[in-house]
Image (tube, grey):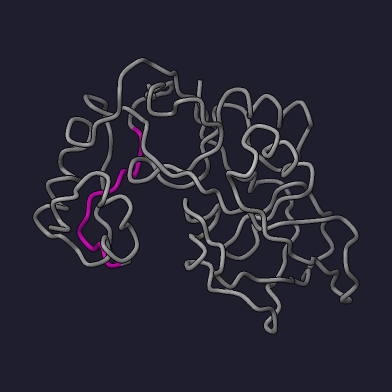
Amino acid sequence: MAWKIDFDYVSAQPNFAIDKDSDGTAPWGFGWGWGAGRSLVGSPVPKSATQTDSNKIVDVFPLPGFACVGERFRVIVEAFEPGVHEFYPIQLKSRKGVPHEESHFLINVCQRFDSILVKGIDLEWGRRVAGGLEGMPYLSRMGTKPPLPVSRTTIAGRHLWLNYWVWEGGIMVSDQLRAALMDAKLRRLKFKEPWAERFDEVDSPFDYREQVPHIVDWMEANKPAAMLEAHLNWVKTYMPNWLQ
């Protein structure tokens, strides 16, 4: 199985503000939230943040535009996929400016691909209104109750990844990684249904023209510059004719 999980926004989270003098980039340059799905080595990343409340520090929580994780989360992920994802140290400080002793990191999930098989499934689609892909279809809601199928051959043993075009937001994890995070009792991730989405793995490959032909048709008709600027690797893999 595979799972789509995210922060537990219902429970109290510690709130932080990125320090203005911290050498960093705007969140959207980082990929927003869980990362960019590709390496960001060499990019400026915030180095420190100051807490704006007195809530308890937890294992995983959102900073403004980023995902912040503790050492326990990093160690578990590294045990499953050593060297695959990037963890950028960030110094967290109390409201009075006192550094917290525990190690924390901004995580950049470096795997991004589509595997959810949506052909013939009741879905709701919207249209993007910003980001250089205005008008492009996006999946706004799953109309069918889980579990939905995902491609086992596409996942191919990977454990932590971001969806690309189909059902963005949150992170995807393997059943094994989810179990390890739960066994460690990591705090502030939603692991269980209905807050987490469960997907059953099947032996069918993910093919864009079969699963989401309307997205492919839109891309071919519009050939937006943003695809070549921000999604060049995707174009090279799935639409290399654009580059001829």
- Tell whether 45 sits left or right of 188: left
Q: Is residue 12 left or right of residue 152?
A: right
Q: Which of the pair 42/7 is nearer the observer?
A: 42
Residue at x-position 61% and y-position 65%: 64
Q: Residue 162: image x %, image y %?
A: 47, 43
Image quarter hosting the C terminus = bottom left
x 51%, y 25%: residue: 157
Q: Is residue 127 visible?
A: yes
Residue 3 position within the rendered picture, expressed as x and y whole percent measured from the top left: 52, 29
Magenta residue check for 173? no
Residue 181 vertical position relative to residue 139 in the rendered view, above or below? above
Q: For the magenta stretch, what is the residue range?
A: 132-142
Can residue 136 be found in the magenta stretch?
A: yes
Is any atom of residue 195 visible in this view?
no
Among the 4 quarters of the image, the one containing residue 41: bottom right
Q: Residue furthest front?
A: 244
Which residue is farthest top? 203
Residue farthest toward the bottom in the current orientation of the protein: 21
The image quadrant of residue 155 is: top left
Q: Residue 180: horizontal and vertical position, in percent?
A: 71, 27
Drawn side of residue 31 relative to residue 222, left or right = right
In which image quadrant can residue 55 be found?
A: bottom right
Residue drawn at (26%, 63%) of the image: 228
Find residue 140 and report its horizontal and vertical position in percent: 34, 45
Q: Is residue 210 above or below residue 19?
A: above
Q: Is residue 62 above or below residue 8?
A: below
Q: How many numbered marks, from 0 up?
A: 0
In the foreground, 35 or 14: 35
| Front-most of residues 198 and 122 | 198
Identity of the residue drawn at 57% across and 54% down? 108
